[in-house]
Image: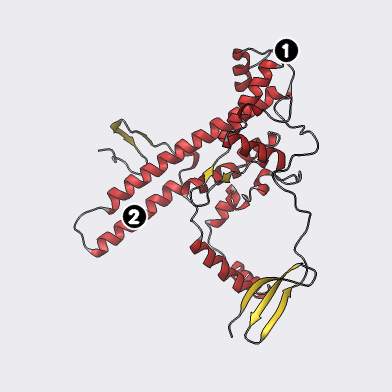
Amino acid sequence: MAVQFSLSYDANGDPVLVENTVTGTRKVVSTSPVVSEYKSRFETPASEDTNTDTDTDTDTSDGGSDIYRYINEMENNADNDLNLSFVEKQNLERYTPEAMKAKGKEKTRTQSVMETIALAMIPYGNAAKGVVKALSKILPQESEEIRAIKQFYADPEMSTLVDDIPGMSNYNLVYGNPFDPSYGLADAADKRTATMAKTLANKYGMTAAEIEMAKVGTYTGDVDSDLIKRIKKTTDLSRKEREQKAEQQYKTTASEELKERTTNIGDVTGAQQRQANRDARAIESAYRNETGDSYSGSYDASDDTSYSDPFDPGGGE
């Protein structure tokens, strides 16, 4: 018997989930899913934000730019639950080092049995699992760069740094067009750093040299402001992210070059080509999952002889 689910509304105007069959319809969920009053992300806060980087709520010197509107939106109207960490707000739990390590392990028989039982006990559990699989074929696949930036910020060192900067955990890590998204916090951090630098200069009379010292944590002057420590943190965040992106770009480029050289092996038998493809996938997996902080490869695009890669000795020859 064919079964279809749809969203309908009862006599009170509350949304309900309805099961449609050839014999009729019935309510599946009859309680309203509304758990709190809707709050527009674009409304102006009623009270002054105490976590601002300037003397006023916002710096309007760049009010027409997209990055300014994005930052203003996120700082004033993002998730206000103070009990949630950055990792929880951004749904990065499955990208933490512990989760990634567990994901790489094969499920035990007991775990598989318990998962099957759980699906059987949850109403329409298997149907929901099927919907998720169907959606995964329609929605764009998560790129290596997006996956890498999520793992980067799910690491305790970076997530703690974000949480230590007031309001920073409310910025979207991935945003924009879902088919070609932008990602990262460095641009937003740079914007805040520039705003704080302007405040330190105009309000506290700090020189450009003193502000640069504050950014690297060596300022020892008389100015006593939370911005001194905060500007170093936003500077550190931006620098570390850009270093991560550069390393990820190198890995992606090197992986693509290796894949081309490994799979494009000329006139060979089908078995040889299949083995070459398997080798290429193994190398790609190594670049993606096994290099970590210890990766030591290097390549200068302006010098073809500079190629150095521990996963491909002699690859530059």
What is the quadrant of the N terminus in the image?
A: bottom right
Image position of 6 with respect to 218: above or below: below
Q: Disc 1 to disc 2, how far (Cα)?
A: 61 Å
Q: Nearer the viewer, residue 137 or 179?
A: 179
> Could you tell me residue 32's position as x and y percent?
77, 66
Residue 109 appears in the picture as rendered: no
Q: Mark 2 = which residue?
A: 279
Q: Nearer the viewer, residue 205 or 230?
A: 205
Q: Mark 1 = which residue?
A: 222
The residue sitting at 61% across, 38% down in the picture is: 158
| Number of marks in picture | 2
The residue sitting at 58% across, 47% down in the picture is: 97
Q: Nearer the viewer, residue 197 or 217?
A: 197
Image position of 114 with respect to 50: above or below: below
Precedes in sequence: disc 1 or disc 2: 1
> Could you tell me residue 91's position as x and y percent?
63, 51
